[in-house]
Image (spheres, rainbow, N blue to C red):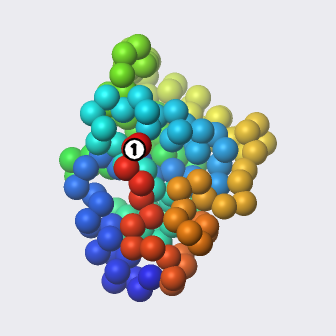
């Protein structure tokens, strides 16, 4: 995929709530599989950070293209990271999962500290995949010139 096509694809998919996640992380992929059927609005979309479109979105929002230690949640033109991203995503979930939003009363440094501990150890605790969970054929997690135009799957 040409860089210009990646940017165009990134702009096209940023019109709704979008979760960028580490596509090779078992914990992150598991969270996506958990979230998708519990999205009460049916609007959440997901894309691996490693994908060309995910990389283009990171670049567009001046976020580092490497060393992903956070979900990136984009909604209504805003970028949310770490525990803030999690609490924003919870708003889209069905009952009783929306109750997790009550944890927002904790100070953000505390919730981010917990998030950082899990993120830093996610591969050791949950393992990692060799290919991205949502990659379209051919499975890849890196920029691939032959990749499909839209690597992002809406919830089923």
Which residue: 41% across, 43% down?
Answer: 156
Left or right, residue 41 beside residue 137: left
Q: Residues within 10 Å of mark 1 (few under 14, many from 20)?
A: some
The local secondary structure at tag 1 comes to: loop
Which residue: 40% across, 83% down?
Answer: 3
Which residue: 52% across, 25% down?
Answer: 110
User: Which residue occupies the foreground of this view, 124 or 43?
Assistant: 43
Can residue 105 be spotted in the picture?
no
Please state the total of marks drawn on the protein image.
1
Q: Position of residue 152 (x, y in %)?
A: 42, 58
Vertical relation: 133 (above or below) 147 = above
Which residue ends up furthest to the right in the rendered image? 124
Left or right, residue 114 beside residue 80: right
Vertical relation: 138 (above or below) 134 = below
User: Which residue occupies the foreground of this view, 37 or 86?
Assistant: 37
Q: Position of residue 9 (x, y in %)?
A: 32, 71
Quadrant of residue 15 in the image?
A: bottom left
User: Which residue occupies the foreground of this view, 33 or 82?
Assistant: 33
Vertical relation: 79 (above or below) 99 = below
Which residue: 34% across, 80% down?
Answer: 5
Q: Position of residue 26 (x, y in %)?
A: 67, 44
Quadrant of residue 56 in the image?
A: bottom left
- Quadrant where the N terminus sits is bottom left
Q: Position of residue 131 (x, y in %)?
A: 66, 61
| Residue where numbered disc 1 is placed | 155
């Amino acid at each position: 995929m040409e860089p210009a096509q990646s940017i165009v694809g990134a702009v096209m998919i940023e019109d709704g709530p979008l979760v960028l996640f580490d596509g090779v992380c078992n914990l992150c992929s598991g969270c996506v599989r958990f979230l998708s059927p519990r999205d009460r609005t049916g609007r959440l979309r997901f894309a691996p950070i490693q994908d060309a479109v995910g990389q283009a979105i990171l670049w567009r929002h001046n976020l580092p293209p490497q060393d992903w230690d956070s979900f990136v949640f984009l909604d209504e033109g805003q970028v949310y990271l770490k525990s803030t991203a999690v609490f924003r995503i919870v708003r889209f979930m069905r009952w009783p999962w929306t109750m997790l939003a009550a944890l927002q009363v904790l100070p953000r440094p505390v919730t981010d500290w917990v998030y950082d501990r899990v993120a830093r150890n996610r591969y050791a605790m949950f393992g990692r995949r060799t290919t991205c969970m949502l990659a379209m054929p051919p499975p890849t997690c890196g920029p691939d010139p032959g990749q499909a135009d839209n690597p992002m799957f809406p919830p089923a």
